[in-house]
Image (tube, coloured by chain):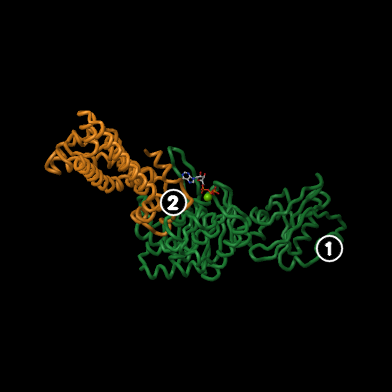
Amino acid sequence: MQPLLSQACWDTLYMVGWSTVIAVVGGLPLGILLVLTDRGGLLQNVAANKVIGQIVNVARSLPFIILMVALMNFTRTITGTTIGREAAIVPLAIGAIPFFARLVETAVREVDGGLVEAVQSMGGNTWTIVRKVLVPESLPSLISSTTTTIVALIGYSAMAGTVGAGGLGDIAIRYGYQRFETQLMWITVAILAVVISLIQFAGDYAARSVHRRGGRSGPAPRLRLLKAA
Amino acid sequence: MITTSGLTKVYRSRGREVTALDGVDLHVREGEVYGVIGQSGAGKSSLIRCVNLLEKPTAGTVTVDGQDLTALAGRGPRAGRELRQARSRIGMVFQHFNLLSSRTVQDNVELPLEILGKSGKERSVKALELLDLVGLADKAKAYPAQLSGGQKQRVGIARALAGDPKVLLSDEATSALDPETTRSILQLLRDLNQQLGLTVLLITHEMDVVKSVCDSAALMQNGRIVESGTVTELLAAPGSELASALFPVSGEAGGEDRTVVDVTFHGEAATQPVISQLSRTYNIDISILGAAIDTVGGLQVGRMRIELPGRYEDNVVPIGFLREQGLQIDVLGQEPVLLKEGAK
Ligand SMILES: Nc1ncnc2c1ncn2[C@@H]1O[C@H](COP(=O)(O)OP(=O)(O)OP(=O)(O)O)[C@@H](O)[C@H]1O
Ligand SMILES: [Mg+2]
């Protein structure tokens, strides 16, 4: 039982870890682009904004299990298989990119426009503004958004069992639902609860310690997290 | 140093058009502190934002230090390299300070230097020097959230000076501060103007600001400059709204058949007993409705509101006498033009 659980734990963390990394790498620029291309933005381009926004909306509203099936061919081209942990990472990451992008968009929008103007008045270009203003000033919210994304990904990863990727969710379903081994199921539920709490705690702690330097301005990241979730 | 000609800004949003600037000709000389004053919505912010092209003018030109900035603007909404370089030589301070909360005070001051591509050593030397100049050397490692409003604005000023600008733009830099702090920030601007020969264009809605630091001033109304000049010129101009706002005297006329006259003294005239001479020469009773003495633009100025018996027509001679004494006379309820004719 123990090797089974530790393997499942590891599988979950592996899938969630990699898909989070990809979601952040893909979603961060996408979210920033959504803000920049919007009306009145630094790279205003209403057409591009509409297109990106629409893609993000559709991708976000697709149920994960359907996304997984729809992406089967794409997954095979990338990983060479449609089964196992690696294969599960592809739909997980692709599902999480638009999710994270919207959270990034909200966070970046909250940055005071006056700061952008100040850097413009110093002769800064758009890239400077992104690097020196938009990202650092929204960092606490970006960290909270990442936490929210990780927690959501843990949820989605439970369904990855359907493609044989294993993980804690898979165990809960297989042993609890199909074989009525409720004890094992409850153990996985407990482990999941602990893992999620730890991640949430670590995320909140990181967001707060970044925010503390900034001090009084802006709402606490915790509140924003509740809104986003 | 700063010249705008025919500067026009029309905002278009959802089919509605707002003309914020309507052919503004502004001329700010090198080394002076120039104040632009006007009511909310007059177009003051639009004007100052057009000077460094944060806002792109609809028509007209802006020249700063001999360089035509409007020519650098290009067609798109994004600022090209040349315009960005020009901007880095114009400092700007803001009403709400606009400091980055994620950076320390020192790092905030270093930001313009980072943009200019200066090395780390150079940046920190310059930043500490500037913080010393604004009296905040001990706060270098603090975060903006740990500072008072006045201290934040000092950081904002230090930051604006980092690129060694010749011109400083200030949009309501003291409007979020209490009177005491306002005074100290204005004093700092004045000192910088004198020590560094910095040209300052400042926007304000407070007459006191103009009074205490400006060499020249302009009054804006509905997107136009309706009065402008050096403070001394303005005070000497008959019927100047800015002058009477800079230096108000109050008092109501006692009745219908009375003439109320504002007498402004400056320099020599202030020392002569004109009022008693007037009373004796023409044998009239003069009531003083109000009077004040103040320093405007570094000059002692006195203003008095007096009341003469009889209508304006009956008082042409005594008013002419006052004018001959080198005093500036404004008759209430009379247009300045009419008044000039009456004096002939
Ligand atoms: N971005 C904008 N879009 C549309 N209209 C604008 C914009 N900025 C300013 N205006 C309009 O232009 C006019 C002038 O505004 P401006 O901000 O220049 O006034 P102001 O003199 O600075 O006022 P205040 O003292 O309140 O700051 C106002 O009628 C305002 O509504
Ligand atoms: Mg304004």
Identify the residue position indicated by label 1 in the image.
Answer: B277
Chain that is coloured green in the picture:
B
Question: Percent x, y for residue B125?
Answer: 42, 70
Question: Percent x, y for residue B323?
Answer: 75, 61
Residue farthest along the left direction in this orientation: A80
Closest to the camera, between mark 1 and mark 2, is: 2
Q: Nearer the viewer, residue B57 or A69?
A: A69
Question: Percent x, y for residue B216?
Answer: 59, 61
Disc 2 marks a residue whose amino acid type is Glu
Can residue B58 be seen? no
Identify the residue position indicated by label 2 in the image.
Answer: B55
User: Quick check: B225 left or right of A40?
Assistant: right
Can residue A221 be seen? yes
Look at the picture and state if B203 lies above or below B222: below
User: Which secondary structure, mark 2?
Assistant: loop
Report in which chain the residue with disc 1 lies. B
Disc 1 marks a residue whose amino acid type is Gln
Question: Percent x, y for residue B42?
Answer: 55, 48
Q: Residues within 10 Å of mark 1 (few under 14, many from 20)?
A: few
Report in which chain the residue with disc 2 lies. B
The CB of the residue at mark 2 lies under 8 Å from ligand 1: yes
User: Quick check: B44 left or right of A4?
Assistant: right
